[in-house]
Image (tube, rainbow, N blue to C red):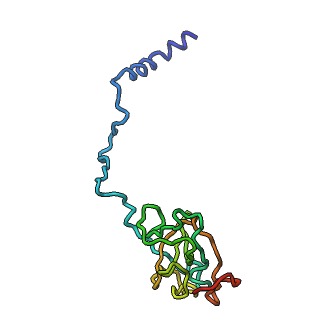
């Protein structure tokens, strides 16, 4: 057994001596020539200026451009929800919808946390917005009404839109 330990001793000596060098700074960049990125104080949030248009016609030409109607939940903070230019918190605010407002729900974000909505200036779902009838292809909303993104957790679905009449299905309510 001792003879086996002596056989491996020459291989262990360099290994033991390698641990006796100068201590290394673990935060130093080893071989990287790329300098660390420091954001200038005036840059702010890079996402704040982004705009993501609301898309209509997501389900194809046989359905309404926007298929559901929603309203602001009563539990919304301050009784209103902020409408954003893109589906994330740092995006700029484009409007507010008070409690009881209704709107068309036209699309969703990939993570399902945001809804793309269309509403008239009075904060209601209106036939004048032009999204209750089918459209031939998917496209960004460019109609006469306002549009934007609201958090899905603060929205209550009210009714689907009947593509043949452009009104809420099952006579749940009327479009103004």
Q: Is residue 44 above or below residue 30?
A: below
Q: Considering the image in quadrants, where does the N terminus appear?
A: top right
The image shows residue 101 at horizontal and vertical percentages of 55, 75
Total numbered badges shown on the rendered structure: 0
- The residue nearer to you, when weighing 49 against 58, is 49
Q: Residue furthest top?
A: 2
Q: Considering the image in quadrants, where does the C terminus appear?
A: bottom right
Q: Residue furthest right?
A: 170
Residue located at (29% from left, 47% from top):
35
The image shows residue 19 at horizontal and vertical percentages of 40, 22
Residue located at (36% from left, 60% from top):
46
- The residue nearer to you, when weighing 88 against 128, is 128
- The residue nearer to you, when weighing 45 against 173, is 173
- Quadrant of residue 52 within the rendered picture: bottom left
The image shows residue 61 at horizontal and vertical percentages of 59, 85
Residue located at (65% from left, 85% from top):
162
Left or right of 132? Residue 27 is left
Q: Residue furthest bottom?
A: 165
Q: Is residue 134 above or below residue 34?
A: below
Residue located at (40% from left, 62% from top):
47
Left or right of 48? Residue 166 is right
The image shows residue 44 at horizontal and vertical percentages of 34, 57
């Amino acid at each position: 057994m001792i003879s086996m330990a002596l056989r491996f001793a020459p291989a262990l000596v360099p290994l033991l001596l390698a641990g006796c060098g100068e201590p290394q700074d673990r935060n130093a960049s080893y071989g990287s020539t790329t300098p660390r990125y420091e954001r200038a104080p005036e840059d702010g949030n890079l996402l704040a200026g982004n705009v993501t248009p609301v898309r209509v016609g997501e389900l194809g030409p046989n359905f309404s451009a926007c298929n559901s109607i929603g309203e602001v939940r009563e539990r919304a903070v301050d009784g209103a929800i902020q409408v954003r230019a893109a589906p994330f918190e740092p995006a700029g605010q484009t409007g507010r919808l008070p409690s009881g407002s209704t709107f068309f729900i036209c699309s969703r974000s990939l993570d399902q946390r945001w809804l793309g909505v269309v509403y008239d200036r009075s904060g209601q779902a209106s036939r004048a917005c032009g999204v209750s009838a089918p459209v031939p292809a998917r496209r960004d909303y460019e109609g006469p009404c306002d549009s934007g993104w609201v958090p899905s957790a603060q929205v209550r679905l009210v009714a689907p839109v009947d593509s043949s009449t452009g009104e809420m299905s099952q006579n749940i309510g009327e479009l103004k």
